[in-house]
């Protein structure tokens, strides 16, 4: 029997697909809703002709693993020090955070030509240990009023030649670097869309990065392709005189969006873009308050630099 207790160790690799040896003391991730497929394969179809009806034996190919999880969004506890979840975002196409001492850690997507990061993951269900190398993935985020904010990651990794799945105890685990988040609410959160303070219910989004396992002679790796950021904003619908998002949709203009969450230095997180383009608007009714709600779907574009999403911890 394998217990359903879940643990993830996650560490950035110095050399692609070379085991970075994450430890429970330094690299344990405080996840929620962790899921995994320890082995995923493609099938080589043989389509053999036989004198009987039925399928023919095929063969497994391009083996890999997938795993997904959520991480709560909080600061590192010290302004100018990157929170641990930024290392996870590096494996999703973002550059290493730029640190300003005692002030901030700023993270953007890696520029064209930059060597993309990868990660080694050790993960357990009970005492069943799995290892993934060269892991890369994509992510999304969610700030919903009355909840803790989080990012959701979906990773794909290669399997090591030996020891991909074994029985092994987790051992000691430390979560000291993971700080407690604060609730998304009026006291802790400020939100602006097009310069207007919309009464926010949810600000969420997805990177939508293309992730593929490449299986060539002489080259086996997880490729992280292009991304196309989309987002969704739900809030109380303002009057047209206060803010006319419908005209913004009709004109195709780009507007800024900024969410600042947290009030204490060391536990403040900001998500920002100057290039939100509204692609759709829906209106619904809030039955509890009898108010009109606006749901705005958009995409976050780039300018001339990787500025479609700028994440700051401060």
Image (tube, rainbow, N blue to C red):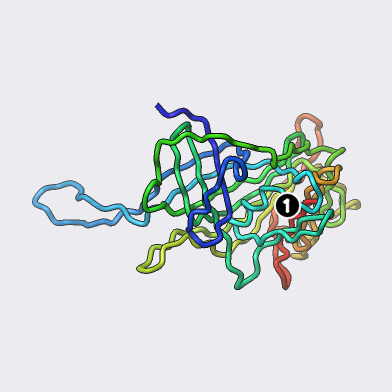
Q: Nearer the viewer, residue 243 or 50?
A: 50
Please determine whether, in this image, residue 7 is positioned above or below residue 161.
Answer: above
Dot 1, crowdedness within 10 Å: few (<14), some or many (≥20)? Answer: many
Say which residue label 1 marks. 82
Secondary element at tag 1: loop
Residue at 26% x, 53% y: name it: 59
Quadrant of the image containing the N terminus: top left
Q: Nearer the viewer, residue 22 or 72?
A: 22
Residue 77 lies, in percent from the top left, at 78, 43
Residue extending furthest left? 51
Residue 258 lies, in percent from the top left, at 80, 54
Residue 62 lies, in percent from the top left, at 37, 57
Please determine whether, in this image, residue 176 is positioned above or below residue 16.
Answer: above
Residue 78 lies, in percent from the top left, at 80, 47
Quadrant position of residue 27: top right
Quadrant position of residue 25: top right
Residue at 59% x, 56% y: name it: 92
């Amino acid at each position: 029997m394998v217990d359903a207790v879940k643990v993830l160790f996650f560490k950035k690799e110095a050399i692609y697909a070379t085991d970075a040896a994450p430890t429970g003391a330094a690299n344990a991730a405080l996840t929620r809703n962790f899921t995994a497929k320890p082995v995923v394969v493609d099938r080589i179809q043989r389509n053999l002709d036989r004198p009987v009806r039925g399928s023919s034996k095929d063969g497994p190919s391009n083996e890999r693993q997938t795993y997904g999880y959520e991480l709560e969004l909080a600061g590192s506890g010290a302004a100018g020090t990157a929170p641990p979840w930024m290392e996870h975002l590096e494996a999703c196409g973002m550059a290493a955070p730029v640190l300003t001492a005692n002030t901030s850690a700023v993270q953007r997507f890696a520029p064209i030509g930059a060597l993309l990061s990868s990660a080694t993951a050790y993960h357990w269900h009970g005492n069943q240990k799995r290892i993934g190398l060269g892991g890369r993935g994509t992510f999304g985020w969610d700030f919903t009023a009355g909840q803790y904010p989080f990012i959701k990651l979906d990773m794909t990794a290669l399997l090591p030649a030996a020891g991909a799945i074994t029985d092994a105890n987790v051992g000691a685990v430390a979560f000291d670097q993971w700080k407690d988040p604060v609730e998304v609410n009026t006291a802790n959160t400020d939100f602006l869309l097009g310069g207007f303070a919309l009464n926010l219910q949810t600000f969420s989004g997805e990177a939508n990065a293309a992730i593929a396992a490449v299986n060539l002679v002489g080259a086996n790796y997880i490729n992280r392709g292009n991304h196309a950021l989309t987002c969704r904003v739900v809030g109380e619908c303002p009057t047209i005189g206060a803010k006319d998002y419908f005209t913004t949709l009709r004109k195709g203009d780009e507007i800024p969006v900024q969410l600042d969450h947290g009030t204490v230095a060391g536990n403040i997180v900001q998500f920002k873009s100057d290039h939100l383009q509204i692609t759709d608007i829906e209106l619904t009714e809030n039955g509890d308050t009898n108010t009109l709600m606006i749901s705005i779907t958009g995409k976050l574009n780039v300018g001339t630099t990787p500025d479609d999403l700028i994440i700051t911890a401060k």
